[in-house]
Image: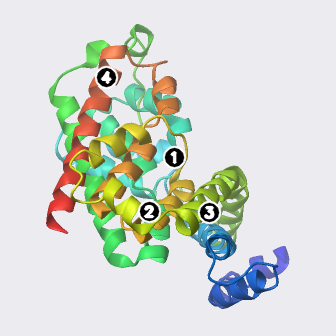
Amino acid sequence: MNTFIKSQPRVFLLIAAILWFGLYKTLEPFSHVLVGWLPVEGGTHLYDALQFFFYDTPKVLLLLAGIVFVMGMINSHFTPERTRALLAGRHEGVGNVMAATLGIVTPFCSCSAVPLFIGFVQAGVPLGVTFSFLISAPMVNEVALALLFGLFGWKVALLYLGLGLMVAIVAGYAIGRLKLEHHLEDWVRNMAHIQATAETDELTLPDRIATGFASVREIVGKVWPYVLAGIAIGAGIHGYVPQDFMASFMGKDAWWAVPVSVLIGIPMYTNAAGIIPIVEALLAKGAALGTVLAFMMSVIALSLPEMIILRKVLKPRLIATFVGVVASGILIVGYVFNAVL
């Protein structure tokens, strides 16, 4: 296999794409056949829940593996060093836009927050620009966008992209204008600045393919328990939660639904791959799109574990400001889209 990839990398990618697409098209009929083999009566709550689980599990994992492989190849162009070099010296405004956009295509999650934050500060990246990147990278990443596209279509994916970028850009800009650098921990402020440089890119296409496979092993290997948990919760919602109950609890008419959804989302810890199956089930049961998007954004962008990690480099007031600004943006997003759509 390695010899074939090295000698014919483009042919390998074409064959892999055809096999992936063919397998993806068989998932729905296979799930019906699989549930049909079980001693479960059709049309019951349990049947619907099992069909959702056996269809969504391979679908989300297959989408995730394909997305991570492709983005692993693309991400090989965006090392932490190159990202710092691109953002170093950028002023607020343009820098916030660049940082939020780079967050879409860079393979960093909330667990990378502290080393990335330190590296950005050392490279002289402004505080507000750094926060735009830290908000965008976990929230508006390639996995979230591609899964949303695969499950809901391009309109919802583009909507989430636009909303996420807006929150990241505006929140980062607002934090930058507040001039809160003195609320960094002292040891972070006192670090010596370094010159950010972009390393030379000498990777070949077979090298990038190997990087893609490595990304699949690393990322899918880490997130699959969250995926299964999310799909199991989504299956329970899909099979057992009445349509009217979810519409009344998370519908447009419940003015308190958006803030409650955000408050519920903050203590949760999962990623886009784990939360999207729950989002799919909530929308199918009548929850409002704005409320569900606000819930999803709060889970990914404002998770409690990320706040605990960031406490190593930020003083409590700066963390509180970060949470308040981002949560306000998410609330506005939820209310506006519940009003418009």
Q: What residue type is labelled 3?
A: Leu
Question: In the shown orientation, is residue 275 left or right of residue 257?
Answer: right
Bin the neighbour count of mark 2 within 10 Å (Cα to Cα): few under 14, some 14-19, many 20 and up. many
Q: Residues within 10 Å of mark 3 (few under 14, many from 20)?
A: few
Looking at the image, do the residues carrying marks 2 and 3 touch, with CB atoms under 8 Å apart?
no
For label 3, the residue is: 203
Which image quarter holds the C terminus?
Answer: bottom left
Which marked residue is nearer to the observer: mark 1 or mark 2? 2
Q: Which of 143 and 331 is in front in this view?
A: 331
One can see residue 115 in this view: yes
Instruction: Pick the residue in front: 85 or 108.
Output: 108
Q: Can you tell which mark lies on residue 327?
A: none
- Which residue in the structure is indicated by mark 4? 320
Query: Could you tell me which secondary element the residue under label 4 belongs to?
Result: helix
Residue 76 at least partly seen: no
How many badges with numbers are in the image? 4
Between disc 4 and disc 1, the foreground one is 4
Tell me which residue sits at (59%, 61%) in the image.
Answer: 236
Q: Mark 1 points at which residue?
A: 108
Residue occupied by mark 2 = 282
At numbered mark 3, what does the secondary structure look like: helix, strand or loop? loop
The first of marks 1 and 2 along the sequence is 1
How would you rate the neighbour count of disc 1 (Cα within 10 Å): few for under 14, some for 14-19, many for 20 or more?
A: many
Per the model, the C-alpha gap separating discs 1 and 2 is: 28 Å
Identity of the amino acid at label 1? Phe
